[in-house]
Image: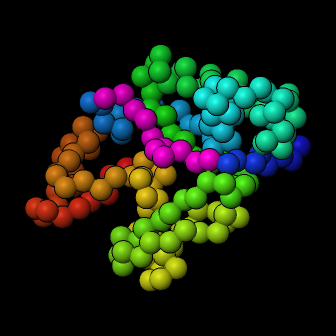
Amino acid sequence: MVNKVKRRVSCFPKATYYKPREIPLCCLEIANISIEELEAIRLCDLLQIEQNEAADRMGISRKTFWSDLQRARQKVADALVNGKAIEISGGEYINTGECRVNFLCKECDHMWEPKFDQNRPTNCPSCGSSLIFRLGGDGRGKRFVENDYCCPKEKGSSRNTSEGSKKKLQ
């Protein structure tokens, strides 16, 4: 098996889930786009950078960049045409440090910015809690909501919480 070259990524998405309106996420198929595939779309389609320069920025060959770009575009088209949710996560990449990401602990309200060469933190450095979220979304589609919610697939299950309390949805 050939080792996959880690792509250099300079920007992370502000939101990591997109889905059709009024359909619960638990009822949808999910198309996963990796962070480096999104970076290819961002460089080529949003910033309109030539593929040669975009490949250089990501530290990969032009052919590899083109493959990543085509794969990402195909996944986006599939999700839009077939009514799938889009999740942006995972991949083999290196954060170049140009994009800053802050995290918040829901247990102790500690906010921090991890070092750019670290992976996504799993615990709060202050209290050790695993209830941490990236500001602007947690990067995995989990949301805190104030009202009661029951996914149609889970009818009959008890997911009620006391009034005003928050609960996590997947």
| Quadrant position of the N terminus in the picture | top right
Reply above or below: 34 against 137. above
In this view, the residue in front, 2 or 141, is 141
**Which residue is farthest bottom?**
127
Does residue 36 appear left or right of residue 101 in this picture?
right
Q: Position of residue 21 (x, y in %)?
A: 31, 29
Residue at point 66% right, 39% down?
39
> Magenta stretch containing residue 12, yes or no?
yes
Colour scheme employed for the rendering of this structure:
rainbow
Reply above or below: 29 against 108. above
Q: Position of residue 168 (x, y in %)?
A: 32, 57
Q: How many discs appear?
A: 0
Residue 25 in view (yes/no): yes
In this view, the residue in front, 59 or 5, is 59
Q: Position of residue 67 (x, y in %)?
A: 77, 27
**Residue numbers of the magenta segment:** 11-21
Residue 56 quadrant: top right
Q: Main secondary structure of the magenta part?
A: loop
Residue 85 quadrant: top left
Does residue 99 appear left or right of residue 152 in this picture?
right
Residue at point 61% right, 54% down?
99
In this view, the residue in front, 155 or 105, is 105
In this view, the residue in front, 111 or 133, is 111
Reply above or below: 112 against 65. below
Q: Position of residue 59 (x, y in %)?
A: 83, 44
Residue 64 in view (yes/no): no
Does residue 95 appear left or right of residue 14 in this picture?
right
> Magenta stretch containing residue 95, yes or no?
no
